[in-house]
Image: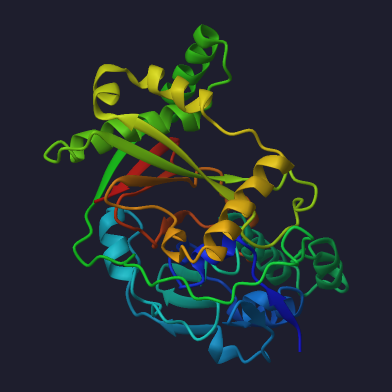
Amino acid sequence: MKRLNISQVSAFFANGSYPIEFLFYFPNKLRTKRLRIALKKISKKFWPVFGSYNNGYIVENKYLETDYYDESVVNEAFDPDVAFESLYFKYGSVISNSIPRLFYLKVLHYTNGTVIIAKMNHLVGDGYSFFYLLSVLAATTKRGSIPFIPILLRALSKPKFHSKLHDNFHLSKEPPIIQTIYDDLVVETKEVNQSEIRSKARITTEKSGLKISTNDILTAQLLKMIQKIKSHIQMETIGLVIPVDMRRAVPELGQRYFGNGLILHRISFTSDEITQKNVEELAIKIRENFPERNLEKYTDFLNIIEDWIAAGKLENLQVYNPEIEFLVTNLSRMPVSRLDFGSGPPSKIIPLTRGKSGAAILVQDNKFILQLGR
């Protein structure tokens, strides 16, 4: 039986917090027989996803479809044009918070297409890993009837689970349970034109001499939203927590690394600073304080986590403090075109995991969509 010790960064999620969950709507119905066959096939290569967690280890489990998959028919049409908020509250609890394993798929067949809801425990991997898995699943499903293609796909897409940076780490203590689900959660939404944001990023780059990204501009706009929402509360400082993927910069990880290949970067702003500075000036500060991506930065972050655990400071294993910090996740680069299971890519993608003081950057119909939970 295979066994994998979780990494230092995965220790943040050993209490089951912040699962990754998305809804995908396909206007053309899927052939789910192929999907189910493909799911079982990839379970061998992606075995930790289909395993179970206990005492610092992910342990291999025998594949049993009912542990990972369910589908049903809904005799009505799916309305993809309703507000994000309505879709979230309708579908956010379709998959139980306590899924039997670390990954689960729910398929709903509507009269006008198919909905797939996919949920993965963050313990086993980050957003990059989540879409890596779904992309391989989609490709295997789509080309499953072509001889030798599934074998070739699995060979080319074989994930990497081990890294020498993590191999000697073992989490023997359970971090405290924290509240991440709020029944009274309200999500503020703002839409902005992509062309407007790209123009601002280009102009700010020219003026500052820094390479300002669209993400910098959008994060600065989120800061303005945050301050407005928190205007009734006396907050001297507002902290941003930004997950930063380190795969390209750390050869010991690499593009095929399946796990939590990230660091959590923090930037603080005073309330006066957010009030007095415009979006472009805030974006410049975000870029100036953005971390270097290299092996040293990544190992420093791993060492900090190990020091917390050694000192018994397990309360520090919290991604962010929703009372004084905001988590900003950029979801605008999801590989939508790779999620073609045979009937075309999804026309609608909705994140179903949302937390208090959590912000997401999405893209839909040539617009950036800013979502902020409060």
Left or right of 309: which side holds 222?
Answer: left
Colouring scheme applied when the structure was drawn: rainbow
Residue 196 higher or lower than 78, as above or below:
above
User: Residue 178, percent across and down?
Assistant: 35, 68
Residue at 41%, 57% (x, y): give it: 350
**Residue 86 appearing in the image:** yes
Percent position of residue 133, x then y:
65, 65
The x and y percentages for residue 115 are 45, 69
From this view, report whether residue 361 is shown above or below residue 63. Answer: above
Residue drawn at point x = 57 percent, y = 16 percent: 210
Q: Position of residue 211 (x, y in %)?
A: 58, 20
316 or 346, which lies in front? 316
Determine if residue 363 is in view.
no
Residue 163: name its quadrant. Answer: bottom right
Instruction: Say whether residue 319 is left or right of residue 338.
Output: left
**Looking at the image, which residue is at 27% across and 53% down?**
83
Q: Quadrant of residue 139?
A: bottom right
Q: How many marks?
A: 0
Q: Residue furthest top?
A: 207
Residue at the location (50% across, 86% down)?
A: 100
Q: Quadrant of the N terminus?
A: bottom right
**The residue positioned farthest toward the front in the image shown:** 311
